[in-house]
Image (cartoon, grey):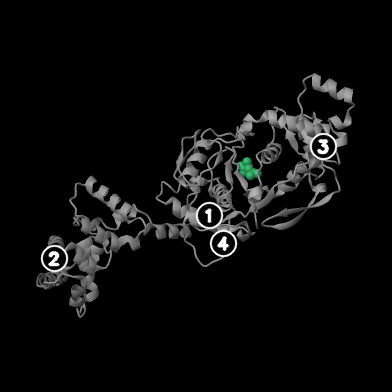
Amino acid sequence: MNYDSQNFVRVRFAPSPTGPLHLGGLRTALYNYLFAKRYGGKFILRIEDTDKKRFVSNSESYILETLKWCHIEPDEGVGYGGPYSPYYQSKRINIYRFYINQLLEKGYAYYAFDTDIDIERKRKEYNDCGLTFSYNSKNRMYLNNSLTMTKEQLNRRLQSCSSYVIRFKIKPGEKFNMYDIIRGNIIANTDHLDDKILLKSDGGATYHLANTIDDHIMKITHVLRGEEWLPSMSFHMLLYRAFGWIPPYFAHLPLILRKDGKGKISKRNADRSDYPIFPIQWKAPDTQIVIPGYRELGYFPEAFVNMLALLGWNPGIKREIFSLRELENFFSLEKISKSGVFFDIKKVNWFNKKYLNKKKEEILFFLCKELKKRSIQYKKDFLWKIIYQTIDRIHFIHEIWEHSFYFFISPSSYESSFFNKICHKKSISHLENEKILLSNTSQFTYENLKSLFKNNQNKREIMQLLRLSLVGFLKGIDLFMIFEILGKEESIRRIEKLINKIKEKI
Ligand code: GLU
């Protein structure tokens, strides 16, 4: 798709402040950001806070912090300012009122005075007959609205301050074509639409009204949003038409599905999920429950963003590692998948591991901190050697300690199940022999030590005993490398320690 600079790209991320962003929400923000960058356009953050009942106080700061962490900051909008301020819908009510009057005047909207109780009664009536009530062209002439009143009756009603909503008047029996960049042509049928509320009884605009007006006023060229909004598209198209505005392009992004086949990823049960749902830590303002996010668990924002970019978009080449700058150059809407995409935490870990290789300095820093905490002296060269040998075994910086502590701390106890299983009287002589062998080795290097043990008859058993003596567990990197890094003296000291421990046992 070509976008000339005259009609330059303006996209928006328009979250409702109803809680933390989850993976899907953040991916929507990322795709908007990438699309804007790809075409030299603007990425706008608009807070859609029209639903006061669902407002959650710290959502906005959460959204801003998350975007910052991911380095996908808006060019314009809440927290960034811009020519179309305010970017909070709650502060734009006069704009919505101005525009809704246009719809009323043109006959595209009407006042409805039915109370919640009236509507509830209707619902029940329909339900009892096995039907579903919806406020639409079939029944609006039997309901309590301005379409069934004279002008005088309406004026009297409005002056008497009775509460009302304003509804969109859908013309029945019309089929029209819509185009979605990802899904192609879609046929809409107005017979399937109800007369949605545009202005609520508290005077506030609904999502549909505010969203459409703002996208037009803010000169949004492309609406990239989650698939859950696809059913609203036809209604939004009719609103654009009623206003006489050219609609933006639409692209509805595929759902992110759970790998276990249990539907889409959702915020519900986030605290019980077996993988994190939120990008950064969320502290619920009501319960004060804290749910850690990817950031707190040690994921790198670059890895996380790289993973998210490929969760529904494919670059068209056989390559998975992309920096944000590279993504900005490659991204295109045409390569977004139509069908839902499966989220796999193993893949996220894979991405983190790939990026870990570029974080050796940070690993060193972390390791130094752990050693200082324990007042352990160290030499940098020694640490580098350990980092190079262990990095393949870890996915996160913080894992370095559990994979390398034995280089700094001689075991004071031994994993009991192995100790009981492999340490017997006979083991003492095995270990004594190895001790002598090692003491006589002048070149205490990996290759040398490896060849030393090559023809050992009880190789498996002896290797296990030696590993237990050096590590305390039957874990760790290549045994001969551990020997080389620890050096002759320390290795022998540890072997003696295990011999003494076995002697105590028998
Ligand atoms: N406020 C809506 C949301 O939170 C935005 C939908 C849209 O982008 O049009 O998902």
Gap in angstroms between the C-alphas marked 3 and 1: 41 Å
Residue type at mark 1: give it.
Answer: Glu
Q: Secondary structure at mark 2?
A: helix
Disc 1: which residue = 328
Gap in angstroms between the C-alphas marked 4 and 2: 52 Å
Q: Secondary structure at mark 3?
A: loop
Q: Are marks 4 and 3 in contact (CB under 8 Å)?
A: no
| Residue 459 falls in image quadrant | bottom left
Q: Which mark is residue 251?
A: none
Q: Residue furthest right?
A: 150
Residue type at mark 2: give it.
Answer: Lys
Q: Nearer the viewer, residue 116 or 416?
A: 116
Q: Quadrant of the C terminus?
A: bottom left
Nearest to the eye among marks 3 and 1: give it. Answer: 1
Disc 2: which residue = 488
Disc 3: which residue = 108
Nearest to the eye among marks 4 and 2: give it. Answer: 4
Disc 4: which residue = 314
Q: Are marks 2 and 3 in contact (CB under 8 Å)?
A: no
Q: Are marks 3 and 1 in contact (CB under 8 Å)?
A: no
Q: Nearer the N terminus, badge 3 or badge 1?
A: 3
Residue type at mark 4: give it.
Answer: Asn
Q: Residue 404 location in percent, x, y?
A: 27, 57
